[in-house]
Amino acid sequence: MTPARAPPFAQIEITTICNYRCFYCAGRDMPQQHMPMERFLGILERLPPSVRQVSLQGEGEPTAHNRFRDLVAAVRQRGLEPYTITNASLIRDPLWFAQAFPLIGISIDTLDAQLAESIGRLKLHRALKGVDRLIAAMGARRIVLHTVDFGQPLDDIREWARAKGFGQHRVQPLQGKADYVRSYRYKPPPRELPAEAPFALQCRYLEQAITSYYTLDGTELPCCFIKDTSSFRSSAELRADLAAGRVPASCSGCSEVRRAAEPLLVR
Ligand SMILES: C[S@@+](CC[C@H](N)C(=O)[O-])C[C@H]1O[C@@H](n2cnc3c(N)ncnc32)[C@H](O)[C@@H]1O
Ligand code: SF4
Ligand code: SF4
């Protein structure tokens, strides 16, 4: 089945450079580069007309891009809504962020400075200062807090999120895909599909065209989870493999893969 090509969201990996060293970050093993302006503008030109929101974010720190403001301005000039997720450690001009972003994502995994340091989220106090600057400039309701659950205690950060009044707190599990896990310093247990041979497999990103993801080199992917693009040819090929009951190398270990008969779980 070929889905209608109408994703409402696009995500563009504008950089792989970062000032942090998160133990779970696939970007630390990628070539370290910012996306050139011309490539970014070229991607904006070829976005499907259905796209309304563009997230400037991949396996690097978006606000570290030397032309971050120009990239955001280019999105807004086209009448599109910019979004980003930032580690909040480089926020120097919160009023600019307040004026440029209707909503913004920040990522904080723990409020324990020692734990933060040990997982590569360095100098936690700088990120917390950045968060407070954003709250003062735009209010907490327009901020989405992202937390990766890698097994750390979460009570404190959940309580902090409530007390600050963030618009949302999204806690997501550590990604279990093979092309992420190979970079991890601590290995989560591998995810196995059920032993009985499934008749067909599916993925909602391939069925519904939820997003278009553009890697640093401009390759368009059906989701943000394919970090090893060496065997990726097309979404149609991924769909055909899954329909035949095979998990393609690009999707190995992905929690989105499910049996065709399984009900769709909202994650
Ligand atoms: C890839 S980062 C890029 C933006 C920015 N540097 C940051 O960390 O906020 C975007 C989000 O993905 C999360 N993330 C990164 N690697 C992950 C992984 N292996 N599993 C789950 N979430 C991950 C980050 O914690 C962050 O919330
Ligand atoms: S802050 Fe973001 S880009 Fe940087 S190392 Fe952590 S997850 Fe990766
Ligand atoms: S990596 Fe996962 S989400 Fe992406 S296309 Fe493959 S199965 Fe779907």
Image (cartoon, rainbow, N blue to C red):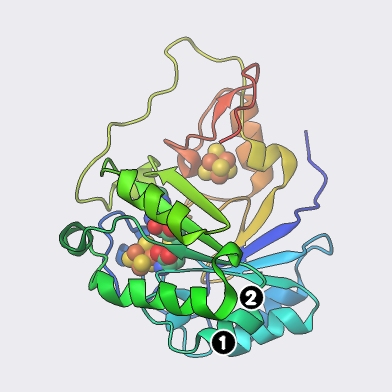
Residue 188, compared with residue 263, is above or below; it is: below
Q: Gap in Å between the C-alphas at discs 1 and 2?
A: 10 Å
User: Residue at left 46%, top 52%?
Assistant: 162
User: Residue at left 61%, top 84%?
Assistant: 71
The residue tagged with tag 2: helix, strand or loop? loop
Residue type indicated by callout 2 = Phe
To which quarter of the image does residue 178 belong?
top left
Q: Is residue 28 visible?
A: yes
User: Residue at left 75%, top 53%?
Assistant: 7
**Dot 2 alpha-carbon crowd within 10 angstroms: few under 14, some 14 to 19, many 20 or more:** some
To which quarter of the image does residue 92 belong?
bottom left
Residue type indicated by callout 1 = Leu
Mark 1 vs 2: CB contact within 8 A = no
The residue that disc 1 covers is: 95
In the rendered structure, find residue 172 and report the number of the disc placed on it: none
Left or right, 137 with reference to 18: right
Q: Is residue 227 visible?
A: no
